[in-house]
Image (tube, grey):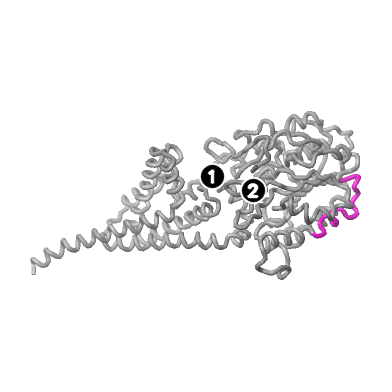
Amino acid sequence: MQRADRDSEPRARRKGLWRLAAAVLVFAAGYAIANRFQLTHGVAYRFAAGDIQSAVTAFLFMAFQAAVFMAALFMFPRRWAAALLVLATASILVNIGYSQIVDELVDGGSLAWMVAEAGQAGNAAGEFGRDFAWVATQAIAALVLFLLARRWARRALTFTWSRGTAAVLLVLLIVPTPLYRHTEVWPEAAERSLYGLGWDLLSAPPPPPRRAPALKPDADAASPQHIVWVVDESVAEEPFRRLIAPKLAGVPHSDFGIAASLGHCSAPAQVALRSGVDVRRASAATDLRMTPSIWAYAKAAGYTTSLIDGQVTGAPQNLILPPERALIEDYRPMVGGIDTDLKIADALNARMRGAGRSFTYAVLRGVHFQYRDHYPKGRIPANSSVALQYDTALAWSKRSFFERLLAGADRAKVAIVYTSDHGQNLTPGALPHCSREAVADEFRVPMLAFLPDAIAAPYAAAPRSGHSASQILPATLIWMGYDRAAVEARYDRDLTQPTARFVWFGRTVIPTGGDGAVDVTAGQDFPGS
């Protein structure tokens, strides 16, 4: 009997070791699923490019993060382990979801962009339903493997738990985050990066105050009484030219043809449009949070400032930070379903027929994907092509927009600019906009102006190509009475000429920490070409 007991002890020990080894392997499989994009971008791509040292560094740092996570998962009591897995799964979902669709790793700029675009989450879920289902499948698979690994490990060994053990594990869980930020190691693992990057954003210094305008308007200038910027959502130039422009044939207006947006994502494009861009000197050091912005110029010229947004019900979107928000005197969310844009047209029309001087920036609902949400159900067959869905959504959105916008308005007293935040890539299967490798169609937008005759006259001979949304602000300042030469020297040419330089911003349109560099591209070629 004693011999049998002695023989059973080694067998039990060996069985426990095999079970622990299996637990480690199962954990590694779950970790690889959760971090497949980190391993691909941080290790495999660097190794394939011959950068062995960087690949090894990335692999070792990933292994360290995995070991810390595994130790905590195996040793934590049940409630602590449950909290750990809930937090890890949330971060993994964000990481896999972003990388699955965009094919790049989440960083501070992209997280800030996702927060700014949170209002479009429903549209994204509808458009990328299959991708999201695959994302959820991967996250669930990783979670199941983590749970299985913990069960096997705790059956294999008895883990001692004490305050000292808890303190050591908590410290080790935190250590990789500051290591990633203060030493030459990468990438940050999927189960933790959401919180590290979130802390970066929350702990970043407050936005700097905006500079006051250095220019003074001419008080005697014959400026329009009301100036309106109408910024549509996801309206591409070619479908607009084909479906909407013919309806304006009998309406006096200036058509500037194909224009380039200032970004292929909504938030960067609108931040740059509102802030104004010094296109000749734009660089990674450009901080659009510090420019005077259109609001300050409008107030200095005697206009009340107003923002109408047809996409949100709460606080302003598109990275309107507190210093900019303070310059907007009247903010009106105006969500109203598929007829939102017509309601905004009526509101703008009423404002233009009112007393006083006003500058209004209107963000339309437009035709953001998924396109079938922007026209009545049954209008076209449910299985219609993406292109037909887009055309139908655009036609419905703008079916009487301009007619209602201009009805009864004194055209001699108002100046209206119409454009879109970005274009659309309608190629089947392609990301419509905000893609990793942007194409020209994501930047091609219409640009029209409805102006008093005296202001419109110089634009009669303006070219129908080569324009950029960066020219809207300087043109508007000239209409407000600011000196043409000074304005063009600080920003871009008036719309009488092509842009001095194409500039467009990526997701990191404002500094988010680190070296403070923004994602900006500039040159003489049309963006995405």
Q: Which residue is mark 2?
A: 265
Q: CA distance from mark 1 to mark 2?
A: 16 Å
Left or right: 329 in relation to 428 = right
Mark 1: amino acid: Gly
Query: Nearer the N terminus, badge 1 or badge 2?
Result: 1
Residue at 49% x, 57% y is: 93
The reply, left or right, for residue 285 in relation to residue 401 is left
Q: Amino acid at mark 2?
A: Cys
The residues colored magenta run 399-414
Q: Locate residue 417, reporting x and y percent.
A: 80, 46
In depth, the one of 327 and 139 nearer the eye is 139
The percent coordinates of residue 70 (x first, y second) are 35, 54
Q: Residue at x 64, y 48 (%)?
A: 265
The spot of residue 411 in percent (x, y) is: 90, 47
Which x, y percent locates residue 47? 41, 42
Q: From the image, which quarter does the C terminus lie in?
A: top right
Q: Secondary structure at mark 1?
A: helix
Is residue 330 visible from the viewing direction of this image? no
Looking at the image, residue 375 lies above or below residue 434: below
Q: Is residue 345 magenta?
A: no
Numbered mark located on residue 172 in the image: none
Q: Which of the pair 36/298 is nearer the observer? A: 36
Q: Residues within 10 Å of mark 1 (few under 14, many from 20)?
A: many
Q: Residues within 10 Å of mark 2 (few under 14, many from 20)?
A: many
Magenta stretch holds residue 401: yes
* Callout 1–callout 2 Cβ contact below 8 Å: no
Q: Is residue 9 visible?
A: yes
Q: Is residue 411 above or below residue 285?
A: below
Q: Secondary structure at mark 2?
A: loop
Label for residue 108? 1
At a point 89% along the width and 43% down the height, the residue shown is 452
